[in-house]
Amino acid sequence: MCELLAMSANVPTDIVFSFTGLAQRGGVTGPHVDGWGITFYEGKGNRTFKDARPSSESHVAQLIKSYPIKSEVVVSHIRQANRGCVSLENTHPFTRELWGQYWTYAHNGQLSDYEQKFVSTRFTAVGDTDSEMAFCWIMDKVVEKFGDKAPDDRLAVYHYISTLADEIRALGVFNMILSDGEHLMSYCSNNLCYITRRAPFGKAKLIDTDVVIDFDKETTPNDVVTVIATRPLTNNEQWNVLTPGEWKLFKKGELISSSVS
C-alpha cells in the first residue's frame, strides 16, 4: 500500500529531512513506485508538486529534497497502486476548495464495495481511485451537514469527518491525512504514527538513508513541529503509534483534539 507524510508547525518550516527519508521508500527501501505528490501551504495558497514516476527517480522529487520550501502545513504521499491506473490524475494529494479554503487529502489503504456508497454531486473525482472518490464523498457530506458557509466551530467539522472516516474504514483500510491549510487531521485504520519535536531539540537519524540532522542548529527554542508518517522515519526518536479508529487534530504543531472510535 501507499505511505503518508504530513507536517504541522507553528512557524514556516521545511520538510526536506523527512521527505528525503520518505522518497527512498518510493523504489529503494520500499515498493511505492507508482507516483508521489506533496502539497505545501503558504497562507491561503498552496503549491502542489506531483509525478507519476517513483519518488526515488523523480527529478521533481530531487528538487523538493534540495529546495527548502518553508510551510506551516505539508501533506505528502507515495503511491503503490491498487485502485486506478498509474497516472498523474490518480496521484495524491488531492485538493478541493470549500469555504474559501483549499482542502488537501491523501489516503493509504484499499477499499471494497464502495461504488454505491461514494455518490457525490458537488465534488467529483477526476481520476478513478477509491481514494479520490472517498475524498469527494467526505466533502459532499460536510457541505450537506454544515452548508455553504463555514461554521464558527471548526472542531465540530473535524469531529464529524471522523465519523465519516469510521464509515469508510468499514469498507477496508483507510489511513487518512486531511487539512484545510490551518488544521491537520490524521485518521488511523492500521498504520499511522507521529512525533512532536520541541525544545530541547536533538539529533535525528533517518532509517531509510544515511542522513543525520541536528535540529538544535535548525530551530529556535519556540518552534513546535509535528510530523505524521505511515511508519517512523527515524530510528533514534520515540514515535507515537496510533491505534485503529484513532484520530488526531493538530494546529501549529500542537495537538488540539483527538479521539478513539
Image (cartoon, helix red, strand yellow):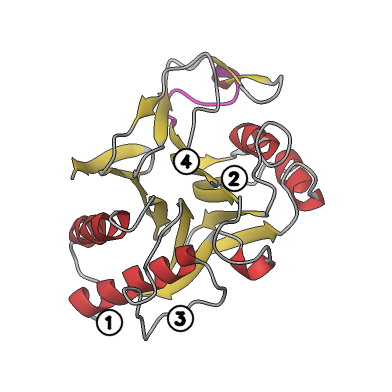
Name the N-terminal-most of marks 4 and 3. Answer: 4
Residue holding disc 3: 124
Q: What residue type is disc 3 on?
A: Thr
Name the N-terminal-most of marks 2 and 1. Answer: 2
Residue contact between numbered discs 1 and 4, judged by CB atoms under 8 Å: no
State which mark lies toward you, 1 or 4: 1
Considering the numbered disc 1 on the image, is that residue within a helix, a strand or a loop?
loop
- Mark 1: give few (<14), some (14-19) or many (20+) Cα within 10 Å: few
Residue holding disc 2: 70
Q: Is residue 177 magenta?
A: no
Of residue 18 and residue 81, the one placed in the foreground of this image is 81
Up-down: is 112 above or below 220?
below
Q: CA distance from mark 4 to mark 3?
A: 34 Å
Name the N-terminal-most of marks 3 and 2. Answer: 2
Residue holding disc 4: 11
Give me the residue at 70% from left, 24% from top: 209
Give me the residue at 48% from left, 59% from top: 43
Q: CA distance from mark 3 to mark 2?
A: 31 Å
Up-down: is 88 above or below 184?
below
Q: Which residues are magenta?
A: 216-224
- Mark 3: give few (<14), some (14-19) or many (20+) Cα within 10 Å: some
- What is the magenta segment's predominant secondary structure? loop
